[in-house]
Image: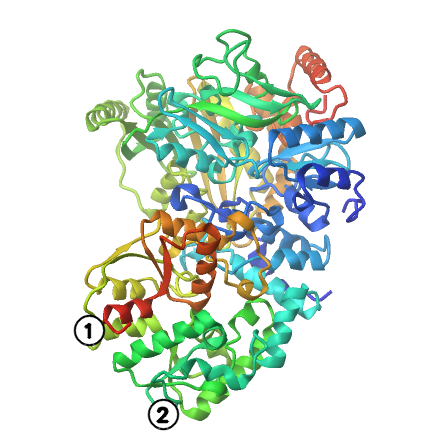
Amino acid sequence: MDMDHLEQLRSNVLKCMGCGVCRGVWDRRDEAMCPVWATGLCFEDSTPRGRVTVAQDLLEGQFEYSLPIAESLYRCTDCASCAVTCDAMDPETGKPIIDVPGVVRAMRMDLVDNSLVPPLVRDYFKAVHVNGNPYKLPQAERGAWAKGSTAQAYSGQEYLLYVGDVGSYDERGMKMARFVSEALGRGGVDFGILGSKEMSDGNDAYALGEWGLFGYLADGNITAFKKAGIKRVICLDPHSFNAFRHDYPGMGADFEAAHYTQVLSEIMKSGTLSVQGYAARVTYHDPCYLGRHNDTYEAPREILNRVPGLELVEMKRNKENAFCCGGGGGNFYTDMLGGGQNSANRIRAREAAESGAEILAVACPLCAKMLEDGIRAEGLEKILAVKDVAEIILEATGSQ
Amino acid sequence: MTEIKNGDHPLFERMCSIVGPEHVTMEEFARRAYTRAPFYALGGGGRGKTPGIVVRPGTTEEIAEIVKLANETHTPIVPKGGGGSVSTFPPLHVGGETNILIDTHRMNRILDIDREYMTVTAECGVILSQLSEAVRKEGFHVYTVDVPIHMDTVGGVLSGFLGGGEPSDMATCGTMNDYLLGLKLVLPTGEILETGGGPGTNVHQKKFLHREAGAPDITGMFLGDGGSFGIKTEATFTIHPYPKVYLPGISDMGTDENMWPAFNQLVCTAPYPYTRLLAFREPGGPWYFVHIIRAHSKEEAGLNKMTLEQIVKANGGGPAQVGDEVMQIANMFSARRLGQQTLPVGSTMTYFGEALIPRLQSLEYLKDINTLLDETVGDLDIYKRVDFVVPYLRATTITGVLLYFGKGTTRDEASRRMYDKSIKRMEELFTTKYGGWTETCQGESAAHSASAWSPATKDFMKNLKKSLDPNNILMPGLWRI
């Protein structure tokens, strides 16, 4: 059975000493950090340590890839909490010597190569492959979110605003795309959109191991961007930002990518976008693909801290210790994680409520949707509302 | 690989009816994930026997049902907590391929923190750092082991020899077991027993804070049993106000002639002027003392510091001027970390010959173990080796060598050599020559420890086990007696 991708990480995999700290370190992070482990419903193989053990056994030929292994591996949300919790640090890089998220991705790529993916994952791949998006909606509707907004088609503006699948097709995501578009416009940012010419960013396809599909999507976007002369891209979605920043350059991309909070933060620093006030206690949830994967923690906080009257309070787990919403690594679409009462989004909703905040600020359309679901499931709607950072800024300008 | 295939364990259906199908697995890859022990030190290779089925019970009553079913069908049971045992686990000679492995992690609730009587009661699947943080939030401290604090469970540690670690205040405050008041457990026959301060008391008992207050210390019988006498499900510990002042330090102690008298004086001084002390050196280098003083006030800490520094100075030592590498080693020992942060790229670590040794023979033992180390792995690429002596109660130390391997050596290769070439000699050193002990009562090393029991002890243990476990269900053959 093919396991070329895992084989490439053999020396990395064998370095793990199996201590299990990757599941969570209580005195630093207060609770289990791995969202799979936190459900309380998994066996050892679904913990980060267990995944590495499975990888070691595969490399040693103890067993071969199988569908049950795939079902276990696809519960991982690629949140990278195990990567920051691991104590086995490489003093030269300051990073763990074992890249557990990388090992999981390699195994997923092998699973795809061996046609061993669970039905929910297969359905996601098929939908993206056939329709260009996981919602199975027409490509022509990709720009529908912009109807009634001031966003213009890209025609040589300084920036492209790239909204991605959730911003294009999901009701909550579309709402967020409109807020971001309006906030950027009010801040004087010169940007355009690709609408139906935009393709899926492929980030989650890659996280799920479909590197062929990812390559196809990335190639499509890179070609479209080059053809349009796009050099700077603002991302609505940290998932897109992650792919553009880490994975596209190796495929020939030559554009700069920024997350919208980074651009908004600069606008607010420059004073171009003035806000009046916003009397509310707000807590901010760090998206995994903006935070741990891309080390961007301050820009959203700088925006919120510049709003008069807004009191920013932190959840007990924040920044690199932030707990995942459960929507990463493709789980937003496949829901392989599950978890019931201790599903990641419900745990995070409870933490947000415990912070005393009345607004839970987000900077990712997937987090917005996951956390709204979590708040509903916990019955916290009356005391806690999810708003994205751009929406808060617009309300603070008095325009909403 | 075992012969058990998916779906053919004879107890699958009945296990599902007890705990729910989502908490039962027979998948080979899932079962094998439970066979890995960290560090790969003693015990030969580090991978334990693969169980035939894994179950995750959520209550004491569910465990009792599982145990009754195991008795009915004569199926061996292996309870497993955090998987931090340094010895091969599950032991290779325990039970057969149909073994039931009980994963206790679902039982992870802190049941009660009583501020008035200063006790905490928790389920035994709670990880120690979870327990520690729960009481710290209330302003209290619970004595637990150190290094495996983030991985080991309450039940696992109580069943082993302090989980292979030690409390940070071990030498001065005793062991984690000293603070245990009572247990709730499932006996090998499936009955549920609560132990505590005497007749009529139980794990939740508040008034008698001594285990032997009204009866023999039944609780103690289940400590270090390797899970063989019962499956622990709840435990009650005493807790104490959290000492807020933390004062660490490092001293340069030079040669054996300076270090050793100072070490002996410090461990015999009462009250102890430190809460934690260790001595370490690299071969050919000077000895260092690392000390930690914990206190409830700056004044108390200052007095202890003054006493400690006087003893150090009187024996020719003084404040250390050390580089980053020595500080990293010191931090590794003094903090609740695993120490890999000190490693060069690609290397891994293990302990060689770590054992409880009578204090006055510690340096002699260290020479012997270093000679054995040279013979066993001396030709391998060892990036760094560190001799260490840590006080363990008054008469004993924990002594050994910490090895950091260079890029060209794998821990597995070294572990195999240790097992193949030196395990017997280590046993002789541990138990015969020095009358010391290895640090594990669970896993594969339990049999090594039991090999040194006297004939009378072996007979007593056999009879005790037979009486408690007539069908030999729990960890059968753990001690190989």
Checking the image for residue A274, the label placed there is: 1
Query: In the rendered image, which quarter contains the C terminus of chain A?
Result: bottom left
Identified by mark 2, the residue type is Gly
Q: Is residue B277 visible?
A: yes
Picture quadrant of residue B461 = top right
* Contact flag, marks 1 and 2 (Cβ < 8 Å): no
Disc 1 to disc 2, C-alpha distance: 27 Å
Determine whether B185 is above or below A325 in the image: above
Q: Nearer the viewer, residue A331 or B52?
A: A331
Query: In the rendered image, which quarter contains the N terminus of chain A?
Result: bottom right
Determine whether A170 is above or below A40 in the image: below
Left or right for B455, reference B339: right
What SS does tag 2 mark?
loop
Identified by mark 1, the residue type is Ser
Left or right for A236, reference A186: right
- Mark 2 lies on residue: A156
Say which chain tag 1 marks.
Answer: A
Residue at point 52%, 34% (across, down): B370
Residue at point 51%, 25% (across, down): B235
Other residues around mark 2 within 10 Å, as few (<14) / some (14–19) / many (≥20): some
Q: Is residue A242 visible?
A: no
Say which chain tag 2 marks.
Answer: A
Provide residue B449's location: percent of width, then percent of height. Answer: 62, 24
The lab-note entry on whether marks 1 and 2 share a chain reads yes
Other residues around mark 1 within 10 Å, as few (<14) / some (14–19) / many (≥20): some
